[in-house]
């Protein structure tokens, strides 16, 4: 069975835009780079040509990946309940040892961006928080290190 990707409306639009850009501008730009590199002569010793062909392979692989994701997805509903942590909510937690608060958006794996506090529902922290309510204490095992959070609030992203 194929994996079902979960997206917010914003995340879906972002991936659709990326796919469209790669199919139009990305392919056009790389074709131009290959054409120019061919003009440099012997292809067996032409690093510009090799680089352009490698970049073309990366673009085509990303297009295939995006098309696959966009064939089998579900939209995270706007009418989700905020009484428990689920995909599509923003959750604020307090680290019980550091006494600091952190806010995470819980998203599907395709939208995860930890540097911008968007964590996947499949990540250790996301998975541990799912289904818990405000005031719940959650212990998370991060590969040997354990952290304890208390859920402070759950709200719309």
Image (spheres, rainbow, N blue to C red):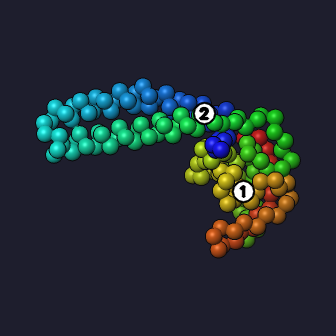
**69 or 18: which is nearer to us?**
69
The circle on residue 127 is 1
Task: Look at 44% across and 28% down and name the residue there.
Answer: 23
The answer to whether residue 35 is left or right of residue 78 is left
Q: Is residue 132 above or below residue 99?
A: above
Tell me the crowding category of disc 1: few under 14, some 14 to 19, or many 20 or more residues within 10 angstroms, Cα based: some
SS for callout 2: helix
Q: Which class describes the residues within 10 Å of circle 2: few (<14), some (14-19), or many (20+)?
A: few
* In the image, residue 17 above or below residue 3: above
Residue in view at x 84 percent, y 41 percent: 81
Residue 142 falls left or right of residue 21: right
**Residue 88, numbered label:** none
- Residue highlighted by disc 2: 71
The answer to whether residue 98 is left or right of residue 56 is right
Q: Residue 152: tell me if it is visible.
A: no
- Residue 102 position in % (x across, y down): 70, 56
Q: Earlier in the sequence, mark 2 or mark 1?
A: 2
Tell me if I can see residue 94 in this picture. Answer: yes
Do residues under tags 2 and 1 come within 8 Å of each other at their CB atoms?
no
Percent x, y of residue 63: 47, 35
Res. 15 image quadrant: top right
Q: Position of residue 134 (x, y in %)?
A: 85, 54
Residue 1 pos. (x, y %): 65, 44
Identify which residue is drawn at 66% across, 41% down: 4
């Amino acid at each position: 069975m194929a994996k079902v990707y979960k997206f917010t409306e914003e995340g879906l639009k972002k991936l659709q835009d990326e796919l469209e850009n790669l199919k139009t501008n990305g392919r056009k730009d790389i074709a131009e780079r290959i054409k120019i590199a061919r003009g440099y002569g012997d292809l067996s010793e032409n690093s510009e040509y090799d680089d352009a062909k490698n970049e073309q392979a990366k673009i085509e692989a990303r297009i295939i990946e995006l098309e696959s994701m966009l064939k089998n997805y579900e939209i995270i509903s706007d009418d989700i309940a905020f009484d428990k942590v689920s995909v599509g909510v923003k959750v604020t937690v307090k680290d019980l040892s550091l006494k600091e608060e952190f806010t995470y958006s819980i998203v599907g794996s395709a939208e995860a961006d930890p540097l911008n506090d968007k964590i996947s529902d499949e990540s250790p922290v996301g998975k541990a928080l799912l289904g818990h309510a405000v005031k719940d204490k959650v212990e998370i095992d991060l590969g040997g290190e354990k952290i304890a959070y208390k859920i402070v609030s759950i709200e719309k992203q």
